[in-house]
Amino acid sequence: MDLAIVAAPPAHVAGVLADAMRRGVARGYIDVASVKGGPRRELEGWGLDLSSYIGTHPMSGREKSGPLAASGDLFEGRPWVLTPTRDTDTEVLNLALELVSHCRAVPVVMDADAHDRAVALVSHMPHLVSSMVAARLEHAEEAAVRLCGQGIRDVTRIAASDPGMWIDILSANPGPVADLLTDVAGDLEETVRALRALQSADEAKRGEGTAGIEGMLRRGNAGQVRVPGKHGSAPRMYEVVAVLIDDQPGQLARIFADAGRAGVNIEDVRIEHATGQQAGLVQLMVEPSAAPVLAASLRERGWAIRQ
């Protein structure tokens, strides 16, 4: 066998790798666990030759796990991190790159510990924050929950993931995640103080509260614009053309076909379902110059456009 691929929880991946390496089942060994530094250090501690090993992490997944949640294009266009060391054999690195290519993913080479800090920031910490927000809904009044819109759905979507899987992930990367949550906790305390100040009868305190909230929101703006845009490129601003649709088969196909007839490329799309009704709002993201053209064309074809 040229390449042995180990898919196991981070806490167990080093043991599985070590067993395969000692038995010499392949020329090269990789894992696809979500944490890289810990397994590598365990293998080093056991005195194994790491020239045949490279840690990897395909940065793609879904909130649902298991084989029935799989899809053939799961990795297409997504980053796949590789964490070679100075000891990694070139042939093993090339085998890993070939695998990434077959999956149509994009290879990204990183240091193992830098990877773990990065995924704590962009994956592990956000998952816990999403779960904390979703937990507020558990015992909320039904009348309040029925008001949920796309914003709360976006924030809580990943909270649907399997807790057992996330215990394995977080147990393997607790330090960087805890450091980030400490920073988040500090921001939360400042935000709470600013909101309390807004309740004050004192005008100066209300001004301080306003400044505190505005500062936090602007910091959020500054961070959000750094999130990569379409195809991993720099983020771009799109105009939204919002179309009311009935929840019936073929409606989306009709909208996309009509957009194509107007000569407009849909850059992104979101769907917001109406509460208690068989209807929804399709938000079509397009280039700013194309928005008036698309809106006018869709109106001509009988679609209801929300301003």
Image: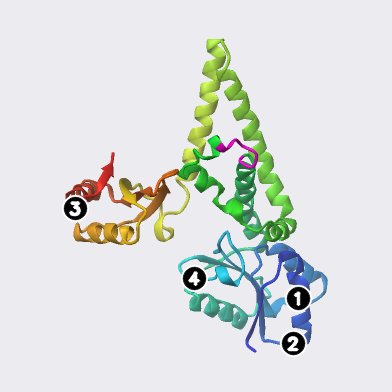
Residue contact between numbered discs 3 and 4, judged by CB atoms under 8 Å:
no
- Magenta stretch secondary structure, dominant: loop
Q: Nearer the viewer, residue 245 or 267?
A: 245
Image: magenta residue range: 137-142
CA–CA distance in space, label 2 to label 3: 65 Å
Of labels 3 and 4, the one closer to you: 3
Identify the amino acid type marked 1: Val
Per the image, label 3 sits on a secondary structure element best described as loop
Labelled disc at residue 105 = 4
State the image coordinates of residue 306 (x, y, percent, origin top left).
Answer: 29, 41
CA–CA distance in space, label 2 to label 1: 12 Å
Q: Nearer the viewer, residue 76 or 140?
A: 140
- Of mark 2 and mark 1, the one earlier in the sequence is 1
Residue contact between numbered discs 3 and 1, judged by CB atoms under 8 Å:
no
Residue 140 belongs to magenta span? yes
Identify the amino acid type marked 2: Gly
How is the protein colored in the picture? rainbow
Of labels 2 and 3, the one closer to you: 3
Vertical arrangement, residue 58 with respect to residue 221, above or below: below
CA–CA distance in space, label 4 to label 2: 28 Å
Labelled disc at residue 175 = none
- Of mark 4 and mark 2, the one earlier in the sequence is 2
* Label 1 Cα neighbours within 10 Å, binned few <14 / some 14-19 / many ≥20: some
Labelled disc at residue 301 = 3
Residue 258 belongs to magenta span? no
Would you name the residue on which mark 1 appears? 16
Residue drawn at (45%, 67%), measured in percent from left and top?
77
Of labels 2 and 1, the one closer to you: 1
- Of mark 3 and mark 4, the one earlier in the sequence is 4
Residue lying farthest left?
300
Labelled disc at residue 24 = 2
* Label 3 Cα neighbours within 10 Å, binned few <14 / some 14-19 / many ≥20: few
